[in-house]
Image (spheres, rainbow, N blue to C red):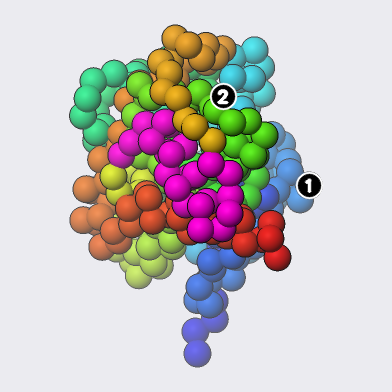
Amino acid sequence: MTAPRPILITGAHGQVGTELQRRAPARYEVVPTDRDELDITDAAAIAAAVASRPWAAVVNCAAHTAVDKAESDVEASWRLNALAPAIFAAETRKAGIPIIQISTDYVFEGDGDHAYRPADPTGPRSVYGASKLGGELAVRTANPQHVVLRTAWVVSAHGNNFIKTMLRVGAERPELRVVADQFGCPTGAPDIADGIYAVLDAIVDGKEPWGTYHLVNAGEGSWHALAEAVFAAAQPFGGPAPAVAAIGTDDYPTPARRPANSRLDTSSFIATFAHQPRPWRAMVDEIVGELLEIKTA
């Protein structure tokens, strides 16, 4: 019997890191680390972690994801989102270990009405997006054995995210105002985890699928559509049912500019890894059900 392949995961307490642990197949030995176990701003600590075992791969899920806070905390954003991936990529290359880097739709300008393809020109308009693009460039430069996975609008039953916020405020207010002129692909952390394992399978099978891909759930919608889907999914559980009013981006100003178009084209990911992400509405139904079942248990 083949021994499980060891995988080092950073950002293990985040949404994707949590799901990677929950959904780990028996063929992998997942070794989770977070800030308490590994300071990814410490180059020596990263080097020691990478050198500690013959990892089958390193999956870097750690990031500075506070999009608005990044506008005023530029150094922290760049240290976590660009410098740390650069060090990880350099150290994994020394050891001959592949790296999977999680990135974001914010690396694009967010204009137009088409789904962005991996090779489309980037042009981030926020500190967060610029720092994540810096991390991508660092990984591509430092380790040829890399897979960069861009995703968007991440939600789950864990941490802070749009679904949990909607359920909380929806139980407190009779009406919510939600932006309806930003469009993207709502994506579940469980689905991202399953996609990452499809990538890992290809790597350990020796297929060398190096490059940049997009990984989001199938379909698209606005934040307003996502909110309505959350409350529709909540009804069988007796969840909140507020009215959801559509507003424009200008009615909800934020420090960081949000992309009007966050659609991502997953065709190259599907073709390369033979893995088709499910529709986002099915994902929402599952996550809302999990959250409300936990609440009523």
| Extreme residue toward the right, this view | 36
Using the image, determine if residue 257 lies above or below residue 269.
Answer: above
Q: Amino acid at mark 2?
A: Val
- Whole-percent x, y for residue 156 in the image: 55, 50
Q: Residue at x 49, y 32 (%)?
A: 243
Q: Are marks 1 and 2 in contact (CB under 8 Å)?
A: no
- Whole-percent x, y for residue 169 in the image: 63, 34
- Camera sees residue 17: no
- Whole-percent x, y for residue 270 in the image: 25, 55
Q: Is residue 206 magenta?
A: no
Using the image, determine if residue 30 lies above or below residue 80.
Answer: below
Q: Which residues are magenta?
A: 220-241
Q: Is residue 115 left or right of residue 38?
A: left
Q: Is residue 236 left or right of residue 293?
A: left
Q: Residue at x 23, y 20 (%)?
A: 112
- Decide which of 59, 262 is in the foreground and name it: 262
| Extreme residue toward the bottom, this view | 1
Q: Residue at x 27, y 23 (%)?
A: 121
| Residue 36 badge | 1
Look at the magenta stretch and give its main secondary structure: helix
Q: Is residue 270 left or right of residue 16?
A: left
Identify the residue under disc 2: 67
Q: Is residue 103 left or right of residue 37?
A: left
Tell which circle, 1 or 2, labels the residue nearer the N-terminal end. 1
Q: Residue at x 67, y 34 (%)?
A: 172
Q: Amino acid at mark 1?
A: Asp
